[in-house]
């Protein structure tokens, strides 16, 4: 599984613009069978960063998306950032789910 995590720091008054642009991606990206998730969240600390997460089944699918016109919208949203956005890519090895929490918390 491959993740793209972007944090955008919108300048004052552009928060809704950034959210609207990123929100417009959810439908088209979710229709791609290799896209496992597309999420937007807002940090409540002083940065007010807007976090945008995409989860992809394969590296190839993610890279194809990065070359697409859809990803141009993400780049356009980044233009509203008052400081350089944080962009990170991760390859994830899934080690568990809620069952892992139960197992770790179980007394020996």
Image (tube, grey):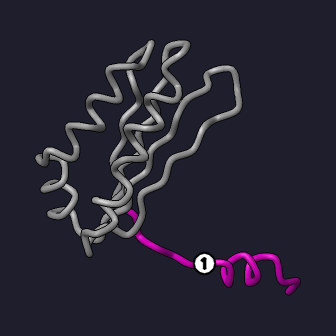
Residue 48 is left or right of residue 4, and the answer is right
Q: Is 99 left, or right, of 94 in this rendering?
A: right
How crowded pointer 1 is (Cα within 10 Å; few <14, some 14-19, many 20+) is rated as few
**Residue 90's x, y, as percent?**
36, 53
Image side of residue 65 versus residue 14, left or right: left
Circle 1 is placed at which residue position? Answer: 97
Query: Which quarter of the image is occupied by the N terminus?
Result: bottom left
**Along the line of sight, the residue nearer the viewer: 104 or 4:** 4
Counting from the top left corner in percent of width and height, residue 41 is at 57, 44
Q: Position of residue 35 (x, y in %)?
A: 31, 67
Q: Height in image: 101 above or below 83?
A: below
Residue with the most extreme right position: 107
Does residue 96 appear to the left or right of 86 in the view shown?
Answer: right
Front-most of residues 85 and 104? 85
Q: Give the mark count.
A: 1
Q: Is residue 85 above or below residue 58?
A: above
User: Residue at the location (29% across, 71% down)?
Assistant: 57
| Residue ID at (68%, 20%) | 46
Taking the spot 26% from the left edge, 37% from the top edge, the residue there is 73
The part of the chain drawn in magenta is 92-108
Classify mark 1: helix, strand or loop.
loop
Task: Find out whether residue 99 is within the magenta segment.
Answer: yes
Quick check: 27 above or below 50? below
- Rendered residue at 85%/86% (across/down): 108
In which quarter of the view is residue 74 placed? top left
């Amino acid at each position: 599984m491959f993740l793209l995590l972007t944090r955008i720091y919108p300048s004052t008054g552009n928060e809704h613009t950034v959210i609207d642009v990123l929100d417009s991606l959810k439908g088209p990206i979710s229709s791609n069978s290799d896209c496992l998730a597309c999420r937007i969240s807002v940090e409540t600390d002083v940065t007010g960063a807007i976090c945008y997460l995409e989860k992809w089944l394969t590296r190839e699918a993610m890279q194809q998306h990065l070359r697409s016109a859809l990803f141009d919208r993400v780049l356009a949203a980044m233009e509203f950032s008052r400081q350089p956005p944080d962009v990170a890519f991760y390859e994830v090895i899934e080690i568990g789910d809620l069952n892992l929490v139960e197992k770790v918390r179980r007394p020996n």
